[in-house]
Amino acid sequence: MKCDEIRDRMPDVAAGFSQPTADESRHLTTCSECAQQLSAMRSTMALLDEWQAPEPSPYFDVRLQARLREEMAKPHAGWMQWFRRPAMAAALTVIMGIGVGVFFARGGLNGGRLNNEVSSNHIVAERGTAVSDLLDLDQNHQLYSDYDVLDDLDVQPNVNP
């Protein structure tokens, strides 16, 4: 008999659940390593048999039952508790996306300008000046180009002799 074969059954023999067969007994008498291992297992099993589990406190069952009753009495939120958090996270994500989109659609940090250049839309000029008239023409170019009435006017320049 080989050592591997007897080591498979050694825990049962050491615990006393079965007796070693004749082949196993002969092997144990000839193999000192297997005999020492069986002896160590038997002493371990004897110590485990002597061990006593500690008793729980006398009020353990009473406290456990009270705790179970408290937990059962608590109202359960149900499926809304599990639905609320993901829904709030999704809503916050949508709101953040819209905010970022509006921010960049309006021109981001520098008002839509690539550099710190001044746009002609932000120049303030007094009404009736040449600068004001040029700005009006520039801003309303499309309106004035489609205004056919201006083309029909027969305006003569006022020339004083």
Image (cartoon, grey):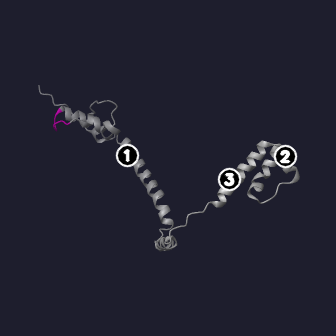
In-image side of 86 versus 48 (left or right):
left
Query: What amino acid type should be assigned to the residue bearing mark 2?
Result: His
- Neighbour class for label 2 at 10 Å: few (<14), some, many (≥20)? some
Q: How far separated are the C-alphas under marks 1 and 3? A: 75 Å
Figure disc tally? 3
Mark 2 or mark 3, which has the lower sequence index?
2
Residue 145 is at least partly visible in this image: no
The quadrant holding residue 118 is top left
Q: Report the magenta stretch's main SS.
A: loop
In the image, the segment drawn in magenta is: 124-129
x then y, percent, for residue 87: 47, 58
Query: What amino acid type should be assigned to the residue bearing mark 1?
Result: Val
Q: How far separated are the C-alphas under marks 2 and 1? A: 86 Å
Residue at label 1? 102
Q: How far separated are the C-alphas under marks 2 and 3? A: 22 Å
Residue 87 is at least partly visible in this image: yes
In-image side of 16 versus 128 (left or right):
right
Quadrant placement of the N terminus:
top right
Residue at label 2? 27
Q: Nearer the viewer, residue 75 or 83?
A: 75
Look at 18% across and 32% down and name the residue there. Answer: 130
Mark 2 or mark 1, which has the lower sequence index?
2
Query: Quick one: SS at disc 3?
Result: helix
